Amino acid sequence: MNALPINKIMLASVAFAFMNWKKILEISILPVLISIPFLTILPDMFNIMNNVFSNKGFADIQLPDNMMIYLLLFCYGYLTLSINVYRLVILGQNSVSGIVPELNFNKIIRFVGLTLFIGLVTMAPVIISGIAFLQLIMYFLVIPIALNFINIAIDQPSKYKWHLNFFSQANLFFLQIVLPALASMIFSFLVSLIGLPDILGWVVKIIVFYWTLISLALCYQIIVK
């Protein structure tokens, strides 16, 4: 298994995005359109979460109309976009289409199942112990399993033993978890410090989201060589 060169993967991810920006834009149209209803109620969802975490009780909480439908559409849009980006990186532009939705039921179930599994494994220790740092530890331990998102996208069987050495796993963890989180937090801090428009913070989060998808696929390419 080849090592994961952080600097080269970072630069390659940016270069890939610039070289394929038209195709990335094309495959983003449908997911964005079906996600708009949920995005419109997102401020209400943040207010609800603030009320819950501030212990104001549930009696006065009123969920937005059609919230579950909007949430399902958003999740489907996220799933479709992720799969298409992975396929674009691994299989090329001819493997994806911006106007064809993902209708492979088996692929959808596998993708959702893996997402729920990683979420449960990383959050359960925190919920049980109340120690937030455990989430990072669990992410480090299970981050190789995230490579199966690419296997799912390109119709390959999942595997749960990747045999990464410590440094490769640490680099994968840094590229997928630490670096995106740091970039988002630092820019959010600068936005609040300088007084920049909040929209810039969302733009950075979107860029980080795409970059994370592309970099995971590039890591996969190196690992499976």
Image (cartoon, rainbow, N blue to C red):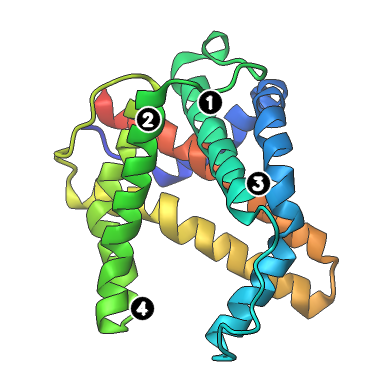
| Tag 4 secondary structure | loop
Q: Tags 1 and 3 in contact by the CB under 8 Å rule?
A: no
Q: Which mark is residue 150?
A: 2
Q: CA distance from mark 1 to mark 3?
A: 16 Å
User: Neighbour class for label 3 at 10 Å: few (<14), some, many (≥20)?
Assistant: some
Q: CA distance from mark 2 to mark 3?
A: 20 Å
Residue 67 in view: yes
The answer to whether residue 47 is above or below residue 221 is below
Q: Position of residue 145 (x, y in %)?
A: 26, 43
User: Neighbour class for label 2 at 10 Å: few (<14), some, many (≥20)?
Assistant: many
User: Which one is in front, 15 or 41?
Assistant: 41
Q: CA distance from mark 4 to mark 1?
A: 32 Å
Label 1 sits on residue? 84
The answer to whether residue 41 is above or below residue 34 is below
For badge 1, the amino acid type reads Asn
Label 3 sits on residue? 207
Q: Which mark is residue 132?
A: 4
User: Which one is in front, 215 or 76?
Assistant: 76
Q: Earlier in the sequence, mark 4 or mark 3?
A: 4
Count of labels shown?
A: 4
For badge 4, the amino acid type reads Ala
Q: CA distance from mark 2 to mark 4?
A: 28 Å
Q: Position of residue 109 (x, y in %)?
A: 36, 34
